[in-house]
Image (tube, rainbow, N blue to C red):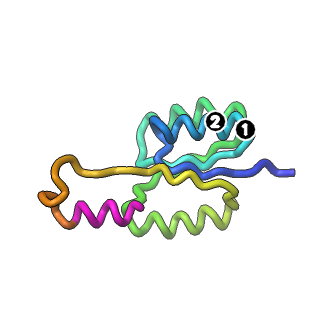
Amino acid sequence: MTEPTALVTGASRGIGAALATELANRGFNLILNARGGEDLEALCSSLSARVTVTPWVADLTHPSALVDLVDLVDYHPIEVLVNNAGGGEPGSFVNQAPAAHQQVINLN
């Protein structure tokens, strides 16, 4: 039997990295998403001794990431989704540009 696969967005640090580690401890293969960076590479490397880990570098605020996500899920059926990607702009909501609000909506 194939081990189940979990997709964790925002997995490079903090809560996302902790949840990815816990899922690996429970035997889940992982697809780990982040916008990029050394943190994601280090996490994938540290978990790959226990389970299969697939890094997925994508900025989920971009519409093209949705196309990539469909392709990814077609190739790797997902049993668990941890939607942990986050972002935001500092300061007062009313003083932020509409484009900043749209980026948060796209991400969610």
The quadrant the C terminus occupies is bottom left
Q: Position of residue 20 (x, y in %)?
A: 59, 40
Left or right position of 61 against 24: left
- Name the residue that disc number 1 marks: 26
Which secondary structure, mark 1? loop
83 inside magenta stretch: no
The quarter holding residue 51 reads: top right
Q: Position of residue 57 (x, y in %)?
A: 47, 50
Q: Residue at x 74, y 40 (%)?
A: 27
- Name the residue that disc number 2 marks: 22
Q: Residue at x 82, y 51 (%)?
A: 2
The quarter holding residue 25 reads: top right
Q: Residues within 10 Å of mark 2 (few under 14, many from 20)?
A: few
Q: Report the span colored magenta.
A: 99-108
Q: Specify the farthest residue to the right.
A: 1
Q: Main secondary structure of the magenta part?
A: helix
Q: Residue at x 73, y 38 (%)?
A: 26
Q: Position of residue 73 (x, y in %)?
A: 63, 63
Q: Residue at x 78, y 48 (%)?
A: 3
101 inside magenta stretch: yes
Left or right position of 11 against 73: left
Is there CB contact under 8 Å for labels 2 and 1?
Answer: yes
Residue type beneath disc 1: Arg
Residue type beneath disc 2: Glu
- Residue in front for this viewpoint, 79 or 33: 79
* Count of marks overlaid on the render: 2
Which secondary structure, mark 2? helix
Q: Position of residue 7 (x, y in %)?
A: 60, 52
